Amino acid sequence: MSWLFLDWFVPLYLLVSVLVLAGFGACLYFLEPGLQDAHKWSSKTVRHHPLVASVNCRDDDSNALI
């Protein structure tokens, strides 16, 4: 008889626990003001910054090893 109980209890327990964790994460996301702004940087246009200095650059540190 215990197998009949486990057949519906285990999937129901897993479903309820996932829903509770998702709800907790949604509450954290919507109630923390800084978390909503954290992903907005990705929507801005990204400027390309070359890793190698240009040929016309005459910095004193242009030949320094990093």
Image (cartoon, rainbow, N blue to C red):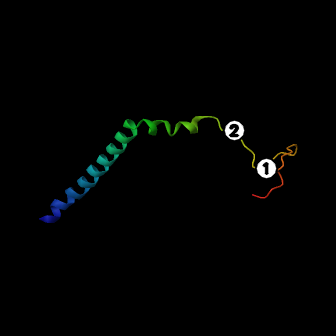
Residue 47's disc is 2
Q: Amino acid at mark 2?
A: Arg
Q: Quadrant of residue 56?
A: top right
Work out whether 32 lies above or below 60: above
Residue 52's disc is 1
| Residue visible at 16% across and 61% down in the picture | 4
Number of dots carrying numbers: 2
Q: Amino acid at mark 1?
A: Val
- Left or right? Give the position of 37 relative to 21: right
In the rendering, at what x and y percent does residue 43 appear?
Answer: 58, 35
| Residue visible at 32% across and 44% down in the picture | 24
| Residue visible at 37% across and 36% down in the picture | 31
Category of crowding for the residue at label 1, using alpha-carbon neighbours closer than 10 angstroms: few (below 14), some (14–19), many (at least 20) = few
Which residue is nearer to you in this view: 13 or 43? Answer: 43
- In which quadrant is the C terminus drawn? bottom right
For marks 2 and 1, give the CA distance: 15 Å
In the rendering, at what x and y percent does residue 51 appear?
Answer: 75, 49
**Residues at circles 2 and 1 in contact by the CB criterion of under 8 Å:** no
Which residue is nearer to you in this view: 17 or 8? Answer: 17
What is the residue that sits farthest to the left in this orientation? Answer: 1
Work out whether 8 lies above or below 49: below
- Left or right? Give the position of 50 relative to 57: left
Work out whether 6 lies above or below 28: below
In the rendering, at what x and y percent does residue 45 appear?
Answer: 64, 35
